[in-house]
Image (cartoon, helix red, strand yellow):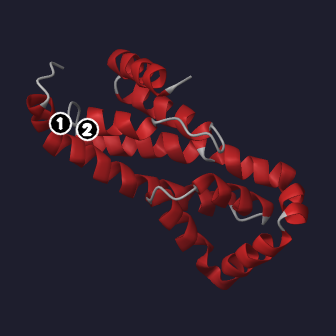
Amino acid sequence: MDFNQFTQWGYELIGALGYLGLFLASLISTSTVIFPLPGYILIFIFGGILNPWFVALFSAFGAALGEGVSYGLGRGGGYIFKKKQEKYFLRAKEWFNKNRGFAVIVIFAATPLPFDVVGIISGTLNYNLKKFLLATFLGKLIAALALSFGGFYSIKWILNVFNLNF
């Protein structure tokens, strides 16, 4: 599925299901490991159409649950990472052991940094799943709030500049 197909599918899903559709689109877009789907564009667009607070909330819930896939990969196959990338694994383990794991997860979830790697590392280190999901949700909520309010305040201007009808 390419960018345009996913965006069209997400637009139709959200049009049909509203906030639940946004939850599902975010869940699916973050469930892909290493090869991300562009769920953020949907948050931006629908932040300009729907209530941006609810857009951020529903998409953050979906994204946090979707990132559980990378955590599960780490739990199930993390030994491969431990063996192949031992130097990086030991560095990550040191960060998590110094009680920085929660902050690292929030920061990576809130930014365009490669979060799947953090999810795999968290699973490999047997980081507490509830803490992982909470930190992921908080980070994704920060990002989703920025995107949804960005859409809320700018989507009409963008459509006007490019003479698009929505």
- Residue designated by label 1: 155
Residue 122's spot in the image, x, y percent? 70, 62
Q: CB atoms at circles 1 and 2 under 8 Å apart?
A: yes
Q: Residue at x 47, y 30 (%)?
A: 25
Query: For the residue carrying disc 2, how many other residues have a C-alpha within 10 Å: few (<14), some (14-19), or many (20+)?
Result: many
Q: In which quarter of the image is the N terminus?
A: top right
Q: In this view, does 114 lie to the left or right of 124?
A: left
Q: Which residue is drawn at 61% across and 63% down?
A: 131
Query: For the residue carrying disc 1, how many other residues have a C-alpha within 10 Å: few (<14), some (14-19), or many (20+)?
Result: many
Nearest the viewer among 33 and 127 is 33
Q: In this view, does 99 lie above or below 37?
A: below
Residue 87's spot in the image, x, y percent? 81, 75
Q: Is residue 155 above or below residue 57?
A: above
Q: In which quarter of the image is the C terminus?
A: top left
- Residue designated by label 2: 47
User: What secondary structure is marked by label 2?
Assistant: helix
Q: Is tag 1's residue or tag 2's residue first in the polypeptide sequence?
A: 2
